[in-house]
Structure formats: structure tokens, C-alpha cells
Amino acid sequence: MKITRSEVAHVAHLARLTFREEEMEKFTSQLNDILLYMDKLNSVDTTGVEPMTHATVLHNAFREDVVKPSLANEQSLANAPDPRGEFFRVPKVIE
Amino acid sequence: MELYSLTIHELQGKLRAGEVTAADILASVYQRIDQVEDKVHSYITLMKESAQAQAAAADAAIRSGDIGALTGIPIALKDIYCVQGFTTTCGSRILHNFVPPYDATVVEKLRAAGAVFTGKTNMDEFAMGSSTETSYFGVTRNPWDLTRIPGGSSGGSAAAVAADECIAALGSDTGGSIRQPAALCGIVGMKPTYGRVSRFGLVAFASSLDQIGPFTKDVEDCAILMNVIAGYDPRESTSVNLEVPDYRSFLSRGIEGLRIGIPREYYIEGIDPEILASVQQAISVLEKAGAKCVDISLPHTEYCLAVYYIVAPAEASSNLARYDGVKYGFRSQEGRDLLDMYKQSRSAGFGDEVKRRIIIGTYVLSSGYYDAYYKKASQVRALIRRDFDEAFQKCDVIATPTSPTAAFRIGEKTDDPMQMYLSDIFTISANMAGIPGISVPCGFTGDGLPIGLQFLGGHFQEGTLIQAAAAYEKAAAMGALIARHKQAKMNFL
């Protein structure tokens, strides 16, 4: 086994997801198949190879620090499931 | 000939000559939509009223002699671009009610060129899929055979163009999501170089791979759309500030002396023999037209899929962390507290494939596994790119099959993610290396299903791809072949 049920449960928590029992079973088995396939990469010699994280030569894109027009409050809040006044409302965090 | 069946350049001729109006063209396209949309289901959202207003504005502009690059042309948009005032769902429940307050840069550019938007097309949820079966809004069917998938993730855009429910469309390509559906639907699809087209306003999937590109009925239309959408955008820090050539100027250059690389790793067992035969036939057409074929090797090809399914989910798990039920989109009412609200909203809002990839991505980035998976994959990715750099020393473009099979049946691969992933085996490498690719139709299977030929080019060599694809299309008389097949095969629509 590349990944166990309890590892999947831990990763699911990190990713803020929950699964039903039978989903958990199916997911763990599918993830194992996928991770086993990834083992192919171990046969490649990558000694001294710089990891590539971007497809082009990338430079930091700087701009002048000047205020430009941006979304109005009501536009920013228009899609919120539970807006209150100027705020996004969420369930209680502290008891 | 119905107006909906024509190309952009054919319609432009008629508009300029005053033979038709933009309103006529739109009415024809909507007549077609009314006729076939029930069967194909290309669209998530239709934009008929705003399209009629855009068509009226286009006609007014034409009367005053102000004709833009796309004035009065009906174009469909994958439901992954923000269009101000219209829901942008990305095929997901979690965004089912999201109405963007702004336009994506590509949408702005199409508007400025005078395009008419027919609607937002169906797609795999968050562009994760190769069949358009993971959409929260139901499957799209391949117009060539309604029991089959149109490819994916941009399957709605490809099906809409193939079924004449629009004149052209835009899609996005992270591992083949433009080229594979274009191949399976018998149309032209291009993934430009990473950085060529601004992604501002595109819902992010895997940020080091995503790119926007056109679906069209022929190569000339592809050049027309590329002329409009390519270019630098200060709002998109990965877009590249490089002059955009006139892509139409490549259309009639021919391919005398063009060196076409044939990578031996792409002509392997596992490809459907009909696909292989069709692509080999296409290569001989290219040779007869004056191209020189060169054997090349891309030795790390067999690792592309493994690298992709580490890198793309890793980036996706990070990009999709923003969907938390707070700022926009779906919120579950089940949550007991804030943490539980996040979990319930995400678990009910995302479909299985998206969850699978978030879990893979979170796992390969998690402490203890990062070096073994993500870092290793990023190193092999560097080797994949090096393969291409070396290959382009020996050739100008590379020719391969676009997809190992023609369109498969709906439901055939939904329970086996690995099998589904394999349908992108020939397209993923271009996203890894950041290079451009184009798929053009090159024939049909015995069952009458379309087959695609893929050309890959060096960074920012879209012009050369258009040159090769246009020359092939002409030498193989592809337009006439497609028209014949369409008449025989699509009459059930």
C-alpha cells in the first residue's frame, strides 16, 4: 500500500474535505493505483537537475505602487453567501 | 448553405459585401442551437438576449464602416472565463451561482474586436477531465455520435463548433483540454505558448500549465482568433511582452523544406491502429507537399503522465483552496462551526474527480512526501523540456497523433481514473514544456469518427504551427472530406 486509509483521512482534513465511509474505501484504492504509477519516476536519474516550476523564464513582475480603480464594496460582496453590511459573515469561531 | 455552417472568414466576406447582417448570422446560429442543443448539450448558459444586442451593435458598426477583426461573428466561451454579469460556473456546483463583476482579458479583447457571445459552454469540473463527463451540469455528447464523449475538458466548446452551434469558440488547455476535444470532434484547436495569451479572468486550475486558445472550423479561422487574443497583459504577470506577428501571414507560406520531426516515442503500441494509419498517411501527404521528415527522439516521453499527475494536482490543491463558502459560491448550511462549514461546503461543492486531485495534490506537497513526489516530478519536467529544446535543433515542428483513440463511449472510463488520464498521453508534454501545439483533422475511422493530427512547435512558434497545419489542410483537401462526412454522419442532428 502506498497510502493508507488513515493517511487519506489526514490529507482530507488538511484539504478541508470529508468523505463518507464507502467513498473513503474507493478513494484510497484509486489513489493507491495512481501513486503506484508515479513510481515510474524513480527510474529517472535526476542527479543535479534543477527542478522546473515554470514553463518560461519568469521574472518578478514589478509595478509602481499606485492606487488604481478596484471593485466597490457592494460588488465584492455581491456573490457572498452571507454578507452583513461591509463584511463577510461566517459561523462562530470562538465559543 | 446555412450561415451557421460557414467559417469566420467566409462570413466576413458576406458581411463586408452586405449580403448578410450580423443579426442574420446570429439568427441562423440560434436556429441551429434550437435544433440540436437538446441532443448535444454544448452549453451551460445561453446568452441570446445580450448576443442580439451585440449583433445589432455590430450591424450599426458595419453600416458606419467600422469593421473589427470579429465584428458580428458568434463565438462561444468555455464557462471558465469571467464574463461580467453572466454566471461563470467552471462546471462546478461550488461556483454554480458565481456572477463575475468583471470580464476576463480574452473576453475584453473579443468584445473590442466586435464578437457576439452565444453563451458559456460545458466543461469538466474545473477543467479536470478528458471527456466532459465530470461537469455538475451533465454530459456533453459528441455530435458525430451521440453515444460518445466529445473529449475534454473543453468538450462543450468543441462540440458547439462541430455541431455548428457557434462559428468558433475559446477553450483552455492544461494537459490537452483544447487539442484532444478538437481531435475527437473533427475541428482545429490550438494551445498557444505559455505566456502568449493573458489568463486574467480565467479560473485557475494548474497555473504553470494553463493556457487559453481557440477552437475553429479551419486553420485560417484559428489564425484570425489568435490575432485577437494573443499579447501581453500587465494584469497577468506570466504573460510575455513579446511582439505578436500577424498569424494570417503564415497561412499560405507552404511547407517546402520545412523539417518535420517524427518522435519515435509517440508511435507506440497502444495507439488504435486506425489512428496510427491515418497519422502516417498525413505524414506522407506532408512529404509530398515538400516537407522533410526527420526521425527524432523525446526520451522522457513515458514519464510525462506521471509528472503531470503530480504537478497539476499539486497546483490545483493550492488554487482550489480559495473555495471556502465565504466570499462567493456554494455554502453548505450543515456546518457546525467555521472549520466544519469549510469541510461541508467543499465536500458538497466539489465532485469526485476534483476531490481526487485535491487529495493527490495535498499529499504530494505534504511534509515527508514533497521531495519524493513534487520535487522529483519538477526535475523530470526539466528533462522533458530539455528533450524538446534538443529536438527543435533538428526540426521546425513535430508531428504526432493528438489522441491515442477516437472518441470513446460515454461512461466507458468514468470508473477508472488511470485509463481516463491515458487519453492525454500525447498532449501533456506540450504543457510540461510550455510549448504551443495545434490539432487539425486528418481523417476518419471506419465508424466515421474524426481523427486528429498534432503539430508541436518551439516557444512562440505559433506561426510555424499555423503554416504547417494550413499547408496540410490544403494538401489533404480536408475541408471537402469533413463536409462529406458531416453530410453523411451528422444528419441525425
Image (tube, coloured by chain):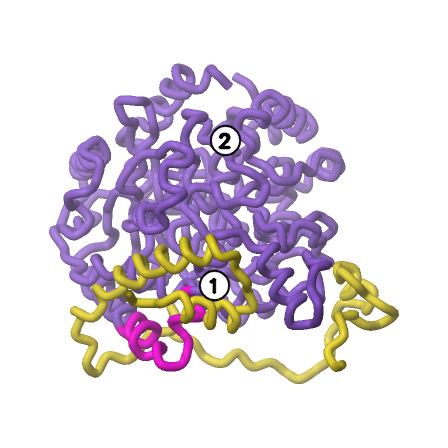
Chain colours: A yellow, B purple
Q: Is residue B370 magenta?
A: yes
Give the amino acid at mark 1: Ile
Toward the viewer: A61 or B362? B362
Q: Which mark is residue B358?
A: 1
> Could you classify mark 2 by the number of other residues whose Cα lies within 10 Å: few (under 14), some (14-19), or many (20 or more)?
some
The residue depicted at 15 percent of the width and 43 percent of the height is: B269
Q: Is residue B256 above or below residue A84?
A: above
B384 sits to left or right of A69: left
Residue farthest along the left direction in this orientation: B295
State the image coordinates of residue B94 (x, y, percent, origin top left): 63, 55
The residue depicted at 46 percent of the width and 53 percent of the height is: A22
Chain of the residue on which disc 1 is drawn: B
- Give the mark nearest the N terminus, 1 or 2: 2
Numbered circles on residues, count: 2
The residue depicted at 59 percent of the width and 50 percent of the height is: B92
Q: Which mark is residue B7?
A: 2
Gap in Å between the C-alphas at discs 1 and 2? Answer: 40 Å
Judging from the image, what secondary structure is the residue with disc 1 in? Answer: helix
Tell me which segment is drawn in magenta.
B360-379
* Magenta highlight: main SS: helix
Q: Nearer the viewer, mark 1 or mark 2?
A: 1
Give the amino acid at mark 2: Thr
Q: Is residue B12 visible?
A: no
Q: Is residue B382 magenta?
A: no
The residue depicted at 53 percent of the width and 41 percent of the height is: B169
Q: Which mark is residue B338?
A: none
Residue B194 figure quarter? bottom left
State the image coordinates of residue B184 (x, y, percent, origin top left): 37, 36
Q: Is residue B421 above or below residue B26?
A: below
